[in-house]
Image (tube, rainbow, N blue to C red):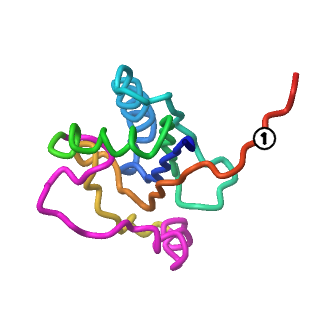
Amino acid sequence: MSKRRDLFIYVPEPGQAEAAKAYLGDWMRSLEGHPGYLGGSVLAEVANELLPDTLVLMLEFESTEAARALWPKIENTVNPLYPDDKSDHSPDQGTRFFDGTKEAVGNGDPLPLKFTRGNGLLARMLHIHAAAVDEFVVAS
């Protein structure tokens, strides 16, 4: 059985980076007790290569089955993984990382994203559900 890591990349509503970090951290902690949930991390992009305040939510599960068992429990709630409007089937917005949006925002243009997750706090850019196929930990 392989561990599973799910990664979700977000950009918060402008001016809401601290609130978004707190929201993602609180939500990640709220999953404690779900069978097979091993924890997670909230990461902030620091190399300034993506859009301002880009965040990553990483969730770790003991298996794909454990991760899949979580989705029915949360899909009809307000959370960072599913759209607030459950009829919204729009795709992730990751193409904005590569289409000149960063430069346009740097020149003062508004951020052209749809903030559809976490009560309108977050724009989901990209996500991946991945099984660990190889791991290495440096011995202390």
**Residue at 54% from the left image edge and 34% from the top image edge:** 41
Span shown in magenta: 78-107
Q: Residue furthest right?
A: 140
Tell which of 129 and 134 is nearer to you: 134
Image quarter for residue 26?
top left
Tell which of 41 and 74 is nearer to you: 74
Residue ID for mark 1: 136
Q: Is residue 112 above or below residue 65?
A: below
The question of residue 105 being in magenta is answered with yes
User: Taken as a whole, is the magenta stretch helix, strand or loop?
Assistant: loop
The quadrant in which the C terminus is found is: top right
In the drawing, does residue 127 fall left or right of residue 52?
A: left
Q: Is residue 106 above or below residue 20?
A: below
Tell which of 78 and 14 is nearer to you: 78
The question of residue 21 being in magenta is answered with no
Q: Amino acid at mark 1?
A: Phe
Could you tell me residue 77's position as x and y percent?
Answer: 17, 40
Answer few, some or many: residues within 10 Å of disc 1's Cα (few below 14, many 20 plus, some between 14 and 19): few
Could you tell me residue 3's position as x and y percent?
Answer: 55, 41
**Residue at 38% from the left image edge and 22% from the top image edge:** 32
Could you tell me residue 110's position as x and y percent?
Answer: 38, 66
**Residue at 34% from the left image edge and 65% from the top image edge:** 113
Q: Is residue 64 above or below residue 38?
A: below
Tell which of 38 and 18 is nearer to you: 38
